[in-house]
Amino acid sequence: MKRNNKRNKLDFDHLEMSAQDLAIIFDSLNIGIRHQRHILEDIWNNDRWVLEKKYNLPNKKLDFYKDVLYQVDYLYNKNDIDDSIRAVIRNAAELGYQVDPGVLVEDELGLSEYFKSIWIQLKYVKLKGMVRIKLRTLLKRYHYKKRSARFCNYVDACLHFYKIGLIVKGVPCDIRDITIDTMVTLYLQS
């Protein structure tokens, strides 16, 4: 189904995992460096489709590893690095220059990071192979009062891209058809 309205067109580029995404997920899950390396190797060998397009060429493996490890190192040393950046900005301001440190850009709904993390957990961390969450909790976590068509479409796009299934009591379901207090189970589809 094609949509004429460019604003409503689903764009999967922001769902692809960046080096920064992986580093943030590793940090939030408190995954050790050996486990990180195994996950990176597994993603490279079996799930390269989930990575940003710039890593999809066979000769980009070293770039992929270096970029992820750089981001992991940044997160571990974030306070020292941020202090250095602030010092550079102050020094530049004293010299009459304006430095724009840039801003982190999230997807419009803030949900892609959640689904990236769920995919990593289901594929490489959790032994159960499923994650449970109430729809109300998901909505609240991302500051939504109710589920809109836009929210549902975006969740569907994430589920489709990461090949994650949604079930309630063992029965596949659509996020639009369940009550807000329903406990849903997310699992990797084969």
Image: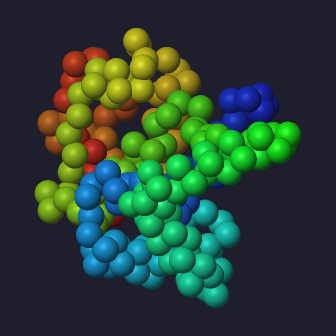
Q: In this view, does 130 lie above or below 40?
A: above
Q: In which quarter of the image is residue 9?
A: top right
Is 62 displayed left or right of 47 in the figure? right
Is 103 displayed left or right of 29 in the figure? right
Q: Residue furthest bottom?
A: 59
* Percent coordinates x, y for residue 43 in the rendering: 43, 73
Q: Does the image show residue 44?
A: yes
Looking at the rendering, in which quadrant would you find the C terminus? bottom left
Q: Does the image show residue 47?
A: no
Residue in front for this viewpoint, 175 or 104? 104
**What residue is drawn where x is 42% and y is 20%?**
143
**What residue is drawn where x is 22% and y is 19%?**
181
Residue in front for this viewpoint, 56 or 81? 81
* Percent coordinates x, y for residue 139 in the rendering: 37, 23
* Percent coordinates x, y for residue 119 in the rendering: 36, 55
**What residue is drawn where x is 57% and y is 39%?**
106
Number of labels in the image equals 0
**What residue is drawn where x is 31% and y is 41%?**
166
Q: In this view, does 35 lie above or below 150?
A: below
